[in-house]
Amino acid sequence: MSLNDDLTPSQRAAVEHEDGPLLVLAGPGSGKTRVVTRRIARLIQRGVSPRQILAITFTNKAALTMRQRVEQLAPGAGVWVSTFHRFAAMLLRRHAEVVGLRPNYTILDESDQRKGLKLVMEEIGLDFSHYPPDRMAARISQLKNDLTTAEAFTQRYEEGIGNNWDQAVARVYPEYQRFLLASNAVDFDDLLLHVAFMLSEHEVLRQQLDHRYRYVLVDEYQDTNAAQYRIVAALSQQHPNLQATGDPDQSIYAWRGARIENILRFEREFPDSRVIKLEENFRSTQAIVRSADRLIGYNKQRKAKKLITNNDEGESVELITFDDAVAESAGIARRIRELSEQHGLTWSDFAIFYRVNALSRQLEVGLMRERIPYQVAAGAAFYDRAEIKDTLAYLRLVANPADRTAFYRAVNTPLRGLGETSQRRLSAWADANGVGLIEACERSAEVPKLSKNAARGFRMFADMISRFDLATRGSVADLLTEIVERSGMAAAWSGSPREEDVQRLGNVEELITAARQYDEAFGDERSIDGFLEQTALVADADTIDDTAGRVTLMTMHSAKGLEYPVVFVLGVEEGLIPHERALRDLSGFELEEERRLLFVGMTRAKQRLFLTQTRLRTFRGRTLASIPSLFASEFEATRVDESHGTPQVYFDRDAFNEPEEQPEPAEPPVDPPTMAKNASVADARPLLMSGADLLNGGKPSGTVNPNRFSEGMLVRHPRYGLGTIVEISRVTSRTNVTVKFTHEDRIQTFIAEKSPLQPVGVKPVAEPAPARAATPDEASPGVPF
C-alpha cells in the first residue's frame, strides 16, 4: 500500500504538495497529524534529507506521537520533531554566546521565575502588597511574547508612555534580565525571545539555519505568538516551504500571547500560498459535529469551512440542568457508571472538562462517592512539590553552578545551619568580588562576619556539588540517586516517622524513575540539560495516562488535541463559559475566543457529549443563582431538566425577553443541598448576578433601577449580546427599554425593572490587571457564584 491509498482527496492533495507555502485548514478530528507525518515521509521519498525537515508542535505528547508515526513510516530517518520551546532550547544551547549565555544555561520554571523576580523586587525596594510579583511576572511575560525587550520597554516609558505600574515594570524588567544573565538562566518566554532576536539580528546565522531546515511544518499554527511567528518566518525566506496546519476555530490561547491573525493572514504574509481545507471529521458522530459546527458559526474571526462527517448519527447532544454543583457531580458520576455498565466502556473512556480548576473539587467528591477512579491533569503538580524542586535544584547546580535560584534552594536543604543571614553575607561578598556563589562557598573563609561553622558548611556544600559534577558521565538516574543519598535528603526522610516524609521519599523515587525512562529513551544523547528541559517544559496534557483506567478531569484548555468516547462539559453558565472577563470586552474578541474554547471542548467527544449547567452555583462560600450561558442557545442539543421545581422565571432566557410583567414565583418546596439549612431558592433571587453587576458596585440584579438606563447607552443581554438603547418610554408604573442589538440587527423591547440588561463599559476604580495576570484555568470566574 502506498502512502496515499487511505487518504481523502483533500488529505492527499496536502501530502503531495511539492514546494512553496501551504496552509492546511484542519477541522477537529480531520486527520491532520496523519497529513503532517505522511507529508514528511513523502518528502523523504522524494529525496529530501531528513535533517532538512523540521516539524514543530505545541505539546510534548503531540511531538512524541508525531515522532513515533514518522519513525513507522520512515524508520531511522531522524527528523527533528519537537515543541517550539524544545527547538528554541536546542538552538540556544548551540548558539548561547550570541545572546550572552553559556551553553549550560538553566531553564527556570514558573515558581523559580517568581522567586528570582521577588529577589529583584526586594533589592529595588518595591512593596509586594502594591506590586504583586505574580502580576509583575505576567506583565513581563506579556511583553516578551510581544517581542518587547527590557530596553525597548524602558525607552518607551521614558518617552512618557505608561502609568505607575509601567514605571515599576520599567525598573524591574531590566534588573530581572540582568539577574537571569548573571545566573546563566532563562525563563520560558526567554527561550523564544532570544531565538527570535538571534535570527533577526544575525543574518549569517539565520541563513545557515534557513538552509539547514528547508521544509518547516508547524502544527497548531493558530496558537503561535509573535515570537514563534518571527522564528518560523526567519526560517522560511530563502526556502519558503512552510506548511502551517491549524484551525482558527480552535485558537484558544490569546491569554498567553497567541495571535489568531497569524493564521488568518497567512496568505498575505506568505505570497503564492496554497490553501487546502480538511473538513471531514473522522472522530465524532453527526449529532456532535452538527452541534459544534452550529456553535462556531456565530464567530466572525474565522476562515469559512463546513464540518462534515460520514459517521453514524449517534445520540443527540444533551444539555442537562441540575439544581446545584452537588446534584451536578452526582448526576455526572451516575451517568458515567450507567454508560460504563450498559456499553462496556472503561473508566478511561470518559473525560470531564471545566472552564476553571475550582469546579473540580465538588466533581471529585461525586466521583469518590460512586467509587469511580479518576485522574486530574495537572502537569505542574508533581514538579511543584517541594521535595522534587529540592532534588532538581541540586541537579541544576551541577549543570549550571551560576544558577542562583537553585543555589538558594539547595544550600540549606536538608538543614545545615546555613540560614538566610549567612546566605545574604555570602551573596553580598560574591557580588562585591565578581564571583559566583559556588566559588564564594569555596572561599567562604574570606567572607566577613561569617561564623566558622557557616564557612565550613559552605565549603562542604561546594565540595559536594563538585563531586556530583564528576559523576555526570553516568546516567541522569544514577546521578539523581547519588544526590538524594549524599545530600542527606534520603536519610532525613527515611528516618522520619511522619507519613508525609515517607511520601516525599516515594515522590523522589518516582522522579528517579522518570530519569531512568529518559535515559533509556535518549541513550547516548542523554544529558542533564536534556532531562531538566523535559521536566521544565512539561504540560498538563503530558501527564495524562491513557492506560490508567481512570476518568480524566481537566480544563478545556488542557483538553486541546485529545479525544474521548464520552465527554462532559461542566458549567455552561454566564461567568464561567463565557468567562466573566469576556463579557466586559466591548470588542467581542474575548467572547469569540470563549466560543472557540467551548467548540474545542465539544469536539473532543467521539460518541456521547453532555453539557451541564446549574440553577445555583456555590463559590467562595456564597450560593448564587446562575444565568445560563448565552452559548446555550447557539448549539443543537436536547434539553434535560433534572432540577426540582426551581422557578423558570429566573433562568429561562425567553422569560427575560417578554415586555409584559411576569408573575411573582412561588417558593420551591425543596431545599437545594448546597444552601444553608432552611434556605430556599427564592432566597437566592436577590443574589442573581452577572459580571456587569460586579462592575456596578456588586449589587444583585433582582430588581433593576430603571433610571440607570439612558438612550444611546451600550448594554449587554445574556442571550443577544451587545446592543444600544434606542428608546426609553414610560407606561403607567413601568419603564420600557428598546434595544437594537448588533447581532442580526435585532430590535427588542424590555421592562427595565425586570430585564437582564446590563450597562457595559464601566471601569473598576482600581488599576486593571494586565490581560495575562492569571491563566483562565486558574483565574476564578468574575461572577461570585
Image: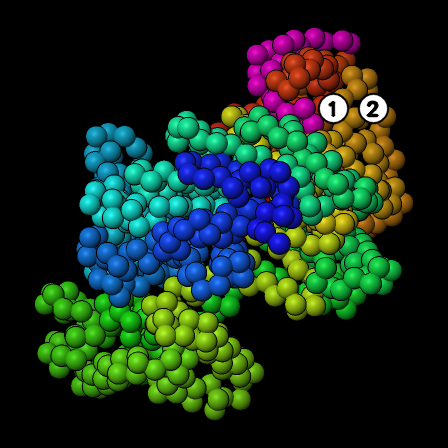
> At which x and y percent is residue 756?
69, 26
Q: Amino acid at mark 2?
A: Gln
Q: Is residue 212 left or right of residue 437?
A: right
- Residues at marks 2 and 1 touching, judged by CB atoms closer than 8 Å: yes
The CA distance from mark 2 to mark 1 is: 8 Å
Q: Earlier in the sequence, mark 2 or mark 1?
A: 2
- From the viewer's side, name the closer residue of 119 and 185: 185
Instruction: Give SS at disc 1.
Output: helix
Q: Is residue 111 left or right of residue 575?
A: left
**What residue does disc 2 label?**
662
Q: Main secondary structure of the magenta part?
A: strand
Q: Which residues are magenta?
A: 710-732
Check residue 754 in the rendering and tell me which mark sits there, or answer none: 1
**Residue at position x 75%, y 41% in the image:** 310
Q: How is the image coloured?
A: rainbow
> Residue extending furthest right?
669
Instruction: Give SS at disc 2.
Output: loop
Image quarter (top left, top right, bottom left or bottom right) of the N terminus: bottom right
- Crowd band around label 1 with a 10 angstrom C-alpha radius: few (<14), some (14–19), many (20+): many
In the rendered image, which quarter is residue 418 located in? bottom left
